[in-house]
Each structure stands twice: as structure tokens, then as C-alpha cells.
Image (cartoon, grey):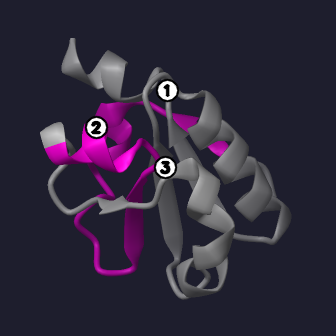
Amino acid sequence: MKPNLVSFSEASKYIYHSKTLLVDLRSREAFATSHISGAWNIPYEELSQYQEEMMNYDRIIFYCDHGNHSLQAARELAKKGKWASSIAGGYEEMKK
């Protein structure tokens, strides 16, 4: 399975579905400053600790500051057969 690269408007179609997990991979400080409502904050460096729990969701949508870490995270879960996406351009692009 391949990871999806999606725009924020595409991702927003799924964000509030019960079997969709939105993950903010930014630092705890950045998350505390602002984030998308409903997102879990799992800093990229801690992601492996939560993989088992994430497997309970049908869709996982990641975002980070610019989209690099989120694409890496989506690739890793897609290799395991999960529907995983990265929001193109990350949080910085969404703020524009």
C-alpha cells in the first residue's frame, strides 16, 4: 500500500470520522501553541511507541511543520497495510 499525499481540504473530509486518527507530529511546545482540533500530539521521535495503538484505526492522517516527517510516518504505516496520509506542506501550509 502507498501513502497518500493529501491537501488539508481533502484530509478534512475524514478528520472527524470515528475510525480516523489525526496525528500532529510536531513538538509538544508547537502543539500547545496551536493545532488542529481533535489531533493527537505524538512527536515524531516518539511515534514508534504508539504504532500498535494506531493500528486500531482505519485511516491515519499525519501532519508536521512542513510535511517531511509526516510523509515518512505515512510511508512506514502504509508498508504495514494501513491507509495512511500526509498533509501536503504540513501545518505551515495550512496556516496560509
Within 10 angstroms of label 3, few (less than 14), some, or many (20 or more) residues? many
Judged by depth in the image, the label closer to the viewer, 1 or 2, is 2
Image quarter hosting the C terminus: top left
What numbered label is drawn on residue 30?
A: 2
* Circle 2 SS class: helix
* Circle 3 SS class: strand
Please name the residue shown 33% across and 19% down the image: 92
User: Which residue in the structure is indicated by mark 1?
Assistant: 88
Within 10 angstroms of label 2, few (less than 14), some, or many (20 or more) residues? some
Which three-letter amino acid code belongs to the residue tagged 1?
A: Ala
Task: Identify which residue, 36 or 19, lies in the foreground.
Answer: 36
Distance CA(mark 2)–CA(mark 3)? 15 Å
Which three-letter amino acid code belongs to the residue tagged 2?
A: Ala
What numbered label is drawn on residue 68?
A: none
Task: Identify which residue, 62 or 82, lies in the foreground.
Answer: 62
List x then y, in percent, for residue 33: 15, 38
CB atoms of marks 2 and 3 within 8 Å: no
Q: Which residue sits furthest front?
A: 29
Residue interval drawn in magenta: 3-32
User: Which residue in the structure is indicated by mark 3?
Assistant: 62
* Circle 1 SS class: loop
